Amino acid sequence: MLKALSSLLPSGDEGPQLPRKELLEKYLKDSRYGDKLKRLMSIKVLYPNNLMAKHFDFGYFDGLSDSMKGSLLTVCNSGIENEDSGMGCYAMQPEDYDRFKPFFSKVIADYHRVPEGKVHINDWSLAGVRGIPAGGKLDLSLLGLPPLSMRVRVGRNLADFPLPGAMTKQDRLNMETKMCQAFAKLIAMSQYGGRYHSLTPGHKDHISDAEYQNLVKSHLMFKNMADDPYLATAGISSDWPHGRGCYVSADKGFIIWVGEEDHLRIMCMKTGTLLNEVFDRLKAALDVVESIPGLQFAKSPTFGYVTSCPTNLGTGMRASVHLKVPNLTADGTDKKAKAVCKPLGLSVRGMGGEHTPIGADGTVDISPSARFCIKEAEIIVALYKGIKLLKEREEGKGDNPLCGLVNAAKENPAAAVAGVCVGALVTGLVITRLGRAKK
Ligand code: ADP
Ligand code: CIR
């Protein structure tokens, strides 16, 4: 086996790190772990983008107790069963990020492109964030845009339950009951009052399938997770639809999902031009939810807010708008929009969220990709700046380096002047060297 895998490895130092032969043989023969580890080994070689497999270290695994070994393989199961995973693992317990730190810190550093060991800091204060317009208003109308559908969500998990991948059916029902007690408090408040919609058969707030489909169509409720192979193999969609539902305020602008990839996805949505409205409302709502007795969100001293998927760790925040980009989507796909958005640090999704098609009129869901080791305030400003740049690209402007310089000058004149000086210096050096080389 080792020989066969080794022959597939690229030459040089760049290939995946394979375990020592004795270690590999020991584990591949072990009936408790052999099958999973065999698959993992071949993924390591054949799917270099699967970060779980890339950073799975047999030496580290060998040093764990039997029960920790089993737990780590459960964490890795989604990426072992879905070799095309980009991440490939989900935490099962709020403590997993800290108890499997040697594994998770590598995966997290690689995905979020931050140095290993960097500590996450949460901060919603917009004051002093780079690139924020004077007055602090993130007003899309100043960019020449009409009212857009704006949404900011955070993933949150309750500290006293296992994460969704490890919950029993009873855990899911207990968590929903606990949240319904919290919702009673929100219902009594004028800013947040509304109702809960449950998918749990027999629940007093149970809704029909048609009502559920309407909520999904209105972007208020999540899709059937059982259809997602990554969530299914992580155990996250188990027991569907028990313990699942959503709380929606009377004005439909404040929503809490219960029982999706995280225990809670808490969000504010509105069609408008002022991004501050959804951002500020969400912060105020989170303070209220977090102050309800008995609700304690899982948080790590190193990693910030704990989420099932390491991609959401830290802030758990995704801030998005639905933006029409007909030129960038003229071929009916999001291919060009994605290529343009990637270097801008933006993700492109479809009109029904992740893995759904774009709108027929070229509307896409745009959000900053970063969630970890970035402040919440920086994410919402990154959305504003990203929309501005994307609009320029859509209009055929701003795709040459000079435009970048002009934008930088508007934002930070001193830095732009420094940039021009460094550029001139480098150009001068190159010309001098070329001149010397000719002689
Ligand atoms: P998440 O944002 O929680 O990671 P998805 O990408 O699956 O999950 O999106 C969930 C739902 O939220 C989908 O119905 C999606 O269309 C909707 N949504 C996301 N952003 C917006 C937005 N700016 N306006 C309206 N709906 C949105
Ligand atoms: C994967 O590893 O590809 C899936 N578990 C999904 C990862 C998280 N989602 C994402 O990047 N948007």
Image (spheres, grey):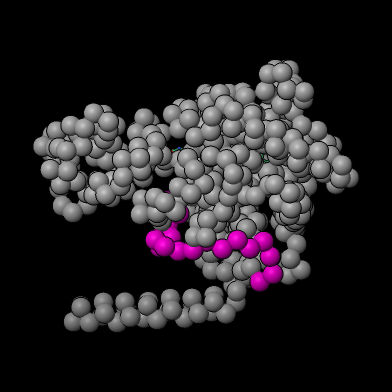
Instruction: Reply above or below: 66 against 432.
Output: above
**What is the x, y in percent for residue 296?**
65, 49
Look at the image and tell me whether residue 54 can be seen: no
Q: Quadrant of ligand 1?
A: top right
Instruction: Reply above or below: 25 against 278.
Output: above
Task: Examine the image and state in which quarter residue 389 appears.
Answer: bottom right
Q: Residue furthest right?
A: 190
The dominant secondary structure in magenta is: loop
Task: Examine the image and state in which quarter residue 170 appears.
Answer: top right
Q: Residue furthest left?
A: 3
Instruction: Reply above or below: 254 against 218.
Output: below
- The quarter of the picture where the N terminus appears is top left
On screen, residue 45 versus residue 105, left or right, reads left
- Magenta residues (range): 110-128
Q: Residue at x 77, y 25 (%)?
A: 205
Instruction: Reply above or below: 63 against 3.
Output: below
On screen, residue 115 versus residue 62, left or right, reads right
**What is the x, y in percent for residue 415?**
54, 77
On screen, residue 108 versus residue 281, left or right, reads left
**What is the x, y in percent for residue 351?**
63, 34
Q: Residue at x 48, y 49 (%)?
A: 95
Seen from the viewer's position, the closer of residues 319 and 398 is: 319
Seen from the viewer's position, the closer of residues 53 and 100 is: 100
Residue 349: within the magenta? no
Q: How many marks?
A: 0
- The quarter of the picture where the C terminus appears is bottom left
Q: Residue at x 53, y 33 (%)?
A: 167
Seen from the viewer's position, the closer of residues 434 and 305 is: 305
